[in-house]
Image (cartoon, rainbow, N blue to C red):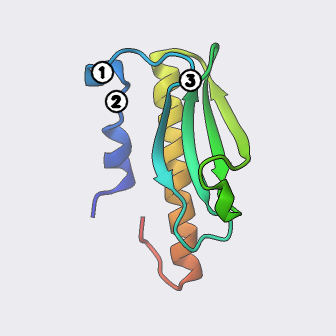
Amino acid sequence: MTSGMVILAEIRTETEQGRPAPTPGWEWSPGCTPIKDRSPGKWIVRRSVDSFDVIFRSYLTPEAREGGPEYPIHSFNPTDPGELGAREMAIKLRNESFRQEAERNGHSNII
């Protein structure tokens, strides 16, 4: 299994990956909460005019799968280091949701 530190060390900005720099409206997601999570949803990094925002989009109701309520978590500067910080936070939050789900199911040291 890959450790969280190795995964975080591999985070790269869009420009480091050879793509154009994110513009307002751009989104990236490291994924969703575990399927049976008590608060299902998706972690998102979104570029706004003056920041990179980490957001949680709730899927508490089936019809909310694509357009559920969004909860802002944290904002970062609109720079490459800001993009990296936002991506790292979103990944850590996703990993934490999986760790908690594993713990509820009696497992430990999953992530």
**Classed neighbour count for the residue bearing mark 1: other residues with Cα under 10 Å, few (<14), some (14–19), many (≥20):** few
Mark 2 neighbour density, 10 Å: few (under 14) some (14–19) many (20 or more)? some
- As measured in the structure, the alpha-carbon distance from the residue carrying label 2 to the one carrying label 1 is 6 Å
User: Which label lies toward us, 2 or 3?
Assistant: 3
Q: Nearer the viewer, residue 4 or 48?
A: 48
User: Residue 56, position in %: x, y?
Assistant: 65, 46
Horizontal and vertical percent for residue 43? Answer: 56, 47
Q: Where residue 2 is drawn, which disc sits there?
A: none
In the picture, the quarter occupied by the C terminus is bottom left
| Residue drawn at point x = 52 percent, y = 70 percent | 35
Say the numbered circle drawn on residue 12: 2
Q: Is 92 left, or right, of 61 in this rendering? A: left
Left or right placement of residue 13 versus residue 108 in this view: left
Of the residues under marks 2 and 3, which one precedes in the sequence? 2
CB under 8 Å between callouts 3 and 1?
no
* In front of the other: 58 or 6: 58
Residue at 65 percent of width and 64 percent of height: 62
- In front of the other: label 3 or label 1? 3
What amino acid is at disc 3? Answer: Gly
For residue 9, side relative to residue 62 (left or right): left
Q: Residue shown at 38%/25% (left/top)?
A: 13
Q: Residue furthest front?
A: 63
Q: Determine which quarter of the picture holds residue 39.
A: bottom right
Query: Dots 2 and 3: beta carbons under 8 Å?
Result: no
Check disc 1 and report the residue beneath it: 16
- Residue placed farthest to the bottom in the image? 106
